[in-house]
Image: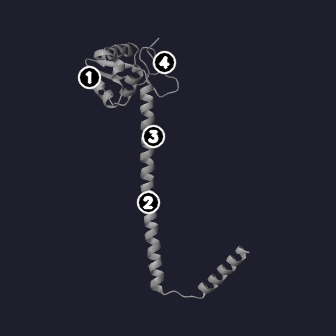
Amino acid sequence: MINVYHNQLRDVIFMNLSSVTFPPEIIAEWERAADELVQKIERDKLLLSSYQRRLAAIRVLARKSEIRSEMSPSEAILFYLEQLDGPISQAKLREHMYECGYQMENFGEAYRYFYTLLSRLERRGKVLREGDEVSLVRGPDPTTGRPGYSGPLRQDTSALSLRG
């Protein structure tokens, strides 16, 4: 019953509006208001997109932080070296890892384990040390022909572990 009444009312309103003519200035005002709303919607879409990208980046950073906290010290060294474009001093690498949030206490007192790991990684052909500078060996290992470091985020990280 209510639907029938509603439909009849709608038909009466539509018939009354179809016979009404609106002044051009009113139509122009409505069109201008509609254009402003469209522009505001477009700005809001851009703003929403920006916030969504920021949120996605925050989620990625949070996940990377979780991954970094799960890394063994040797995986962490390789991970941070991979982020760099070239050689870096060992002290600067330590600082970089600390600034990025890696728990440096994993390297023991006076970071002795850090230097031990650098030596082990060098013997395994994963890093190259020249004087005080260290860099990641990229591409195939020249001694074994096997591929060099491909990152701790791959599925099988057991080859990177120096323990056991």
Measured as percent of width and height from the top left, residue 69 is found at 42, 27
Q: Mark 4: which secondary structure?
A: helix
Which residue was labeled with disc 3?
59
18 lies left or right of 77: right
4 lies left or right of 41: right
Q: Residue at x 46, y 58 (%)?
A: 45
Which residue was labeled with disc 2?
44
Measured as percent of width and height from the top left, residue 141 is found at 43, 18
- For disc 4, the neighbor class at 10 Å (few under 14, some 14 to 19, many from 20) is few
Separation (CA) of disc 3 from disc 4: 28 Å
| Figure quadrant of residue 88 | top left
Mark 1 or 4, which is nearer the eye?
1
Q: Amino acid at mark 2?
A: Asp
Which residue was labeled with disc 4?
159
Mark 2 or 4, which is nearer the eye?
2
Q: Amino acid at mark 4?
A: Ala
Separation (CA) of disc 2 from disc 1: 47 Å
Q: Mark 1: which secondary structure?
A: helix
Mark 3 or 4, which is nearer the eye?
3
Q: Earlier in the sequence, mark 2 or mark 3?
A: 2
Q: Earlier in the sequence, mark 1 or mark 4?
A: 1
- For disc 2, the neighbor class at 10 Å (few under 14, some 14 to 19, many from 20) is few
In the image, which disc is placed on residue 91?
1
Residue nearer the viewer, 99 or 35? 99
| Figure quadrant of residue 8 | bottom right
Residue nearer the viewer, 162 or 30? 30
Separation (CA) of disc 1 from disc 4: 26 Å
Q: Mark 3: which secondary structure?
A: helix
Q: Residue at x 65, y 84 (%)?
A: 12
When the figure is inspected, residue 30 is found, relative to residue 92, above or below; the finding is below
Q: Amino acid at mark 1?
A: Ala
